[in-house]
Image (cartoon, rainbow, N blue to C red):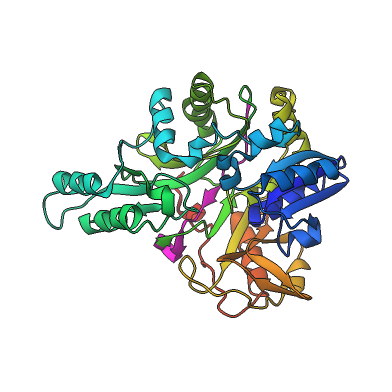
Amino acid sequence: MNVLVIGNGGREHALAWKIGQSSRVDRVFVAPGNAGTALDAENVDISPTDFPQLIKFAKQNDIGLTVVGPEAPLVAGVVDAFQDAGLKVFGPNKAAAQMEGSKAFCKKILRQADVPTAEYRVFRDADSATRYIKDRFPHEGEDVPVVVKADGLAAGKGVTVCHKAEDALEAIHQIARDKIFGDAGNQIVIEERLDGQEASVLAITDGQAIVTLAPAQDHKPAFDNDEGPNTGGMGAYSPTPIVTERMLPEINERVLVPTVHALKRSRRPFRGVLYAGLIMTNQGPKVLEYNVRLGDPECQPILMRLKTDLVDILEATVDGRLGEIEPLQWDPRPAVCVVMASDGYPGDYTKGHVIRGLSEAAEMPDVKVFHAGTTLKGSDVVTAGGRVLGVTALGDSIATAKLNAYTAVKKIRWEGAWCRKDISDKAQITPS
């Protein structure tokens, strides 16, 4: 069959690449795609939020399955539109996608499901949120262990981890008064700051069965040692030793199963990827947030390791027969993804810089360069985003996978290119 992937980031490149490996697939289209998907699939110049044009294309090109990559079209209802048109589509509908579209809604579901998570309050305006911080932390210089979040979608940047009152007050001001995230800041969620390492556990569910993917660890802060502002993710690796085989059944039982049941009870049955962002506390794993799609960049190392036909999994989910799928097969080797970014990211950055060395990196065994913010300018591949490439490599150990990924990174260059140098190092310091 023909498959359409919606989106233009590193996740969508990884999806198109993996879907293209299926013996059941003839052609893979990506709308709108990037310079990397142009090599591994066929790009279609349609916006991810132009639902009528996407549906028209799917009908005209005999698309048997559409896979939605990013969160924005999911939250806007692309799955509902495709289903209404009688087309097969992978992803949660608009109602279920509110698990990512509204952090306040997500926390409400977690509370109803009795899933371990941080205590929280929701505020509709800056004044009430400001009063809450000042009343709760009246003493100058004291630790303010809170996290301030924009309620809506903010491309992974709407979260501020606070240590002082001024951190929290500034975050409230930017979100609710300056509206740096637009309507995403119409509500503010303030929750307690939890201490521990973070991990990502992604599961695919058809609303009944739950298939857990290999755990991964993302690196959100911009700079080494987890310093600097939050980003969409500067790298990831899988598996992560912080989530042991022994812990996965507990996470399934205490986190994923009750969440899926709570959504079903609220008449928002969930079909698609349910991505639990966890923090490993002294009291056990707690949910920081849920996403409703594959993580970017976690998707890249996870799909590098997946050996089961991805199309079989996606189609079984859409058809409501995920429970019939055989246990997933994985490459035992770890994978590490290093994000190469534009100078200035996650703030302002320039575009249009010519990228050199891609063919040299592509020649390395067990390495795949996934494109995120790239486009074609004539025969040149040029930068077109903040996170530009996800250089992903397999290795016999995490250390070897890291070495392979950074060896490939060194072959690639453009003006202002940079990356974190410590992706996957946490695996070496994780207590057993």
From the viewer's perspective, is 418 left or right of 230? right
Horizontal and vertical percent position of residue 359: 77, 72
On whether residue 224 falls in the magenta region, the answer is: yes
The residue depicted at 11 percent of the width and 52 percent of the height is 139
Please identify the residue farthest to the top as the structure is shown.
Answer: 265
Residue visible at 79% across and 46% down in the picture: 57
Residue 310 visible, this orientation: yes
Where residue 189 sits: x, y (%)?
34, 42
- Relative placement, left or right, of 425 versus 107 is right
Outermost residue toward the front in this view: 52
Res 411 → quadrant: bottom right
> In the rendered image of this protein, does residue 144 appear above or below residue 350?
above
Q: Point out residue 309 in the picture as x, y percentages from the top left corner.
A: 78, 39
304 to the left or right of 387: right
Q: Residue furthest bottom?
A: 415
Residue 351, relative to residue 387: is it above or below? Answer: below
* Residue sitting nearer the eye, 430 or 158: 158
> Front-most of 61 and 388?
61
Residue 239 visible (yes or no):
no
Q: Vertical placement of 98 versus 210: above or below?
A: below
Whether residue 256 appears in magenta in the rendering, the answer is no
Q: Name the residue nearer the viewer: 126 or 294.
A: 126
Q: Position of residue 366 (x, y in %)?
A: 74, 59
Residue depicted at x 65% and y 50%: 48
The magenta stretch is 210-228
Residue closest to the eye, 324 or 421:
324
User: Where 20 sits versus 104, above or below?
Assistant: below
Residue ranking furthest to the left? 139
| Residue pictured at 73% horizontal, 62% vertical | 36
Instruction: Examine the image and state in which quarter residue 140 appears.
Output: bottom left
